[in-house]
């Protein structure tokens, strides 16, 4: 049986770093690289070679995710790594996004992760790994990136519970919680909102996070956190009352929740 890895959002940023690391694994014959823009996926294949199989899909759309299931049924492949990495943020208040835009983020960041797991798990043998990308934003509620942090809290909790439920199949599920990363995420996230996240403290290179995530998944861990600062935030969020952590976040971002948006 052909051994494959599936990486969503593989064309740029963190997903691209995962593709580089998985490509080094000799037993993996193909990497199904999924994202919307075909040209970026083709570029990845030109740069990384024929192991990369570009698959252009919009994972916020459930019917497009079913296409992955049809391909798997036809290919006779088994999945050794499923890396659910595609996701995006918007730095703004609840009312700055339309209903459609709000639901699209939920559809990709949550729906895409759940549906890709349901489609792929039947093709995953004992010893295979699911890696779901959550965020440091999952540790506590974050005003002014409220929706994004809530989707990532879902991914973190869902993945850790899934890890337990998959024990009888010998599959691990790892929730990865990176801090700020040097990627293209910010281009899409900054919509010029008056009250928004603007202080990106402790920015890290994505290759380090990806390497630790794969190592943690290989060890069968359910959580992967890279770096001293993010580990400190993780422990603080457990020890301090959530209201206190939210207050620290607002001060870090220089946001006064009582001020009118025009005064920010
Ligand atoms: N950057 C950070 O500071 C940070 C911190 C913590 C967690 N994360 C998480 O890390 C993951 C990767 O983000 P990144 O920072 O690497 O961002 P990025 O550079 O913007 O990459 C996002 C990737 O997802 C793909 N994508 C976006 N919408 C999609 C859709 N509807 N269907 C299929 N693919 C889609 C993009 O390709 P197309 O545009 O071609 O579809 C791209 O390949 C995300 O889940 C993000 O939430 C990022």
Image: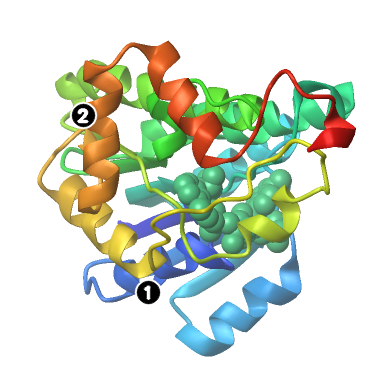
Compute the Cα span from label 1 to label 2: 31 Å
- Residue of label 1: 20
Q: In which quarter of the image is the C terminus?
A: top right
Left or right: residue 141 versus residue 224 is right
Query: Residue 108: x percent and y percent?
Result: 65, 36
Residue underneath mark 2: 235
Which quadrant of the figure has residue 134?
A: top left
Q: Which colour scheme is used?
A: rainbow
**Element class at badge 2:** helix
Q: Residue at x 10, y 46 (%)?
A: 219
- Compare marks 1 and 2 and give the one earlier in the sequence: 1
Give percent across and percent down for residue 105.
Answer: 70, 33
Residue count near mark 1 (Cα–Cα under 10 Å), binned few <14, some 14–19, many ≥20: some
137 on left or right of 94: left
Q: Is residue 238 above or below residue 65?
A: above
Judge by depth and name the residue closer to the eye, 186 or 100: 186
Check if mark 1's residue and mark 2's residue have beta carbons within 8 Å.
no
Left or right: where does residue 112 sit relative to residue 179?
Answer: right
Between 4 and 180, the one nearer to me in the picture? 180
Q: Position of residue 209 (x, y in %)?
A: 31, 58
């Amino acid at each position: 049986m052909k051994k494959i890895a599936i990486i969503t959002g593989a064309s740029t940023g963190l997903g691209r770093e995962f593709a580089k690391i998985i490509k080094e694994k000799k037993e993996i014959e193909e990497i199904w690289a999924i994202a919307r823009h075909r040209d970026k996926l083709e570029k990845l294949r030109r740069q990384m070679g024929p192991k990369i199989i570009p698959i252009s899909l919009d994972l916020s759309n459930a019917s497009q995710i079913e296409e992955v299931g049809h391909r798997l049924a036809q290919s006779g492949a088994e999945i050794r790594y499923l890396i659910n990495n595609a996701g995006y943020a918007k730095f703004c208040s609840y009312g700055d996004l339309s209903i459609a835009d709000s639901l699209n983020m939920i559809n990709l960041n949550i729906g895409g992760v759940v549906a890709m797991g349901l489609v792929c798990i039947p093709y995953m043998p004992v010893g295979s790994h699911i890696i779901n990308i959550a965020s440091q934003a999952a540790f506590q509620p974050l005003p002014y990136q409220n929706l994004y942090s809530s989707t990532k809290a879902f991914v973190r909790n869902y993945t850790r519970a899934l890890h337990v439920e998959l024990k009888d199949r010998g599959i691990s599920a790892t929730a990865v919680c990176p801090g700020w990363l040097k990627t293209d995420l910010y281009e899409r996230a900054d919509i010029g909102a008056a009250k928004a996240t603007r202080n990106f403290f402790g920015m890290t290179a994505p290759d380090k996070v990806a390497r630790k995530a794969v190592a943690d998944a290989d060890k069968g861990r359910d959580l992967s956190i890279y770096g001293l600062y993010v580990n400190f935030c993780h422990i603080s969020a457990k020890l301090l009352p959530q209201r206190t952590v939210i207050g620290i976040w607002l001060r870090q971002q220089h946001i006064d929740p009582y001020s009118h948006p025009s005064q920010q």
